[in-house]
Image: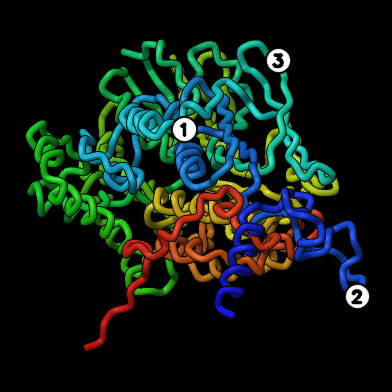
Amino acid sequence: MYKRIRRNLSVLSRSSSTAPTMNGSAKGVPAKEEAVPSPKESPPASKPWIVEDRSVDQVRPLRVVIMGAGISGIVACIRFAQRIPEIDLCVYEKNADVGGTWFENRYPGCACDIPAHTYQATFAPNPGWTQFYASAKEIWQYWKDVAQKYGCYRYMKFKQKVVEAIWDDNKAKWCLKVENLDDGSIHADECDVFISAQGSLNKWKWPDIPGLHDFKGKLVHTAKWDESYDYKGQRVAIIGNGSSGIQVLPAMLPDVAHIDHYARGRTWLSPTLAREVLNQRYGTDKDNITFTPEELARFKENRDEYQKFRKDIELDLQSNFAVTVKGTPEQLAGPAYFAENMKRRLARKPELLDQMLPSFPPGCRRLTPGPGYLEALTDDKVEVINTEIKEVDATGIRTADGKHRPVDMIVCATGFDTTYRPAFPFKGRNGVSLADKWKEHPETYISLATDEFPNFFMCLGPNAALGHGSLLLLIEKSIDYMTECVKKIQRDNILWMMPRRDAVERFTTHCDQYFSRTVFSTKCRSWYKGGREDGRVVALWPGSSLHALKTFANPRWEDFEYRYINDNPNGWIGDGWTVAERNKAISVDYLDDDQIDFPPIVS
């Protein structure tokens, strides 16, 4: 009896050692030995055939296109290449190199207003930052080095601009048109998954001022700086006191004869972030510091020391979320604390404090420490002008009070188009235009995707920026989420996925309700609200960066709708085989200690 059993097992083993072909039959096995009916035969009870001819762990090849090679595009490129098998990856970038905003913005004083040690990839810590607030060129070089280190350039195509993206429901693909900016030619491309990594602040714009382009002197925008122009000894007008205006003024001041600073909007300047960390380590009350060669050498040689310094800064950055929520003790104490800091820095011209202090609470507009800015305003070469600009003529600027101020150069530090509407034809299912869909205000699902746009994900889309915390952490975690979505597409034999409409509506309602309790909804003109005083908060994440980290950690698959290959939701389970069995490459390394989740022993 036992011999017969062993013989039967041997026969079964030999017959099953040959993998079935993809039409359901077994290669080399007589038809009479087939254990399952052919898909061409009628299955029992005339039910539709749902056993898909694929292994349960088989992944289908996917082409993924990323638009933009800034920070988000670099991190996305690294993670998709690392984590997604069978991927055909392409990154289109309109500029000549990586870096995005840090490649484009080259105005004097351009720097990050977040400490450099928290403005870096978690997986690529840099102990070599030369300044606490790193310059734009140093940040750009860091991200170029990261892109080179992790092999991103092999996937990137520069001076290539996506000018159209149309979803084809029959193909289940994004059909793209891409312009070669060197010769103006257009070529077509297709992809299964399309990712926008162009961010929200990439379309700079001139201010709407009558006669601006009649000016015969030098006219520049901070986002399109002419590095060849020599402004030494000139009279300069700087329009705008947002982040770029706050940085460019003190940087230009030493080299110019005079600056007219047009700053109608009142704004809060924050104290230096992590000031206590700097004081404890260096005994300094400076707003920015340059690290000595000896200090940099210690950081490079002693990783533990650098990690502690880095984590102390990160902890300080993450610890002040309560100041953004109305009515908390931290928020109520904020105005006096900020005002005292500004008063100290404006000590040479105390009258400027009344011109600058806003009526809205700190945080309604984006906060920046602005090292050196307030001190520069007290310089005798600077005139701060609160009067509205009426017009620009060939020689200068005329304000509403009739006063004309001649200048040699006008610097527009006036920001970007923050509507989030695409600048090119971008259409989803049934021809839905994203520009039309977001005409009134943009709506997303947790900032990463929107309904009617299958297999489309966004980095730093609407409601993705931060009013508090670490933006780089949010970027990384959002891209982790996207890779999980694409892995699900491959694993579950999905043709496309996109957020359900009701999930998008719930997130929109959630944002409106959440922001009503925060300082961001108070009356001030801010890009957080699309440049409006009373607009909806469409730029910010509804919570801290730590809150975003937890939100992105576990995707809610029930908030998406799906279409499956062959319209077969059962296709994920395959036909009983694994890829290793088909390839005769079975491994039992699941018994290795490092593959086993050993529970703790209770004594």
Residue 21 is situated, as x and y percent measured from the top left of the image, at: 73, 49
The residue at the point 40 percent across, 25 percent down is: 107
Q: Which mark is nearer the camera, 1 or 3?
A: 3
Q: Which of marks 1 and 3 is nearer the N terminus?
A: 1
Q: Distance between the residues labelled 1 and 3?
A: 25 Å
User: Quick check: can you spot residue 533?
Assistant: no
The residue wearing badge 1 is 101
Q: Earlier in the sequence, mark 2 or mark 1?
A: 2
Residue 543 is situated, as x and y percent measured from the top left of the image, at: 47, 64
Q: How far apart are marks 2 and 3 (CA)?
A: 58 Å
Residue 454's disc number: none
Q: For numbered disc 1, what is the local secondary structure? A: helix
Q: Which mark is nearer the camera, 2 or 3?
A: 2
Q: Which mark is nearer the camera, 2 or 1?
A: 2
Q: For numbered disc 3, what is the local secondary structure? A: loop
The residue wearing badge 3 is 185
The residue wearing badge 2 is 45
Please tell me which residue lies in front, 121 or 132.
Answer: 121
Q: Label 2 amino acid?
A: Ala
Residue 198 position (above or below residue 457): above
Residue 86 position (above or below residue 218): below
Please tell me which residue lies in front, 329 or 554.
Answer: 554
Q: Label 3 amino acid?
A: Ser
User: Are the two marked residues, 1 and 3, in contact with CB atoms closer than 8 angstroms?
Assistant: no
Quarter of the picture containing the C terminus is: bottom left
The residue at the point 64 percent across, 38 percent down is: 63
Residue 393 is situated, as x and y percent measured from the top left of the image, at: 57, 18
Mark 2 nearby-residue class (10 Å; few <14, some 14–19, many ≥20):
few
Q: How far apart are marks 2 and 1 (CA)?
A: 62 Å
User: Quick check: can you spot residue 113?
Assistant: yes
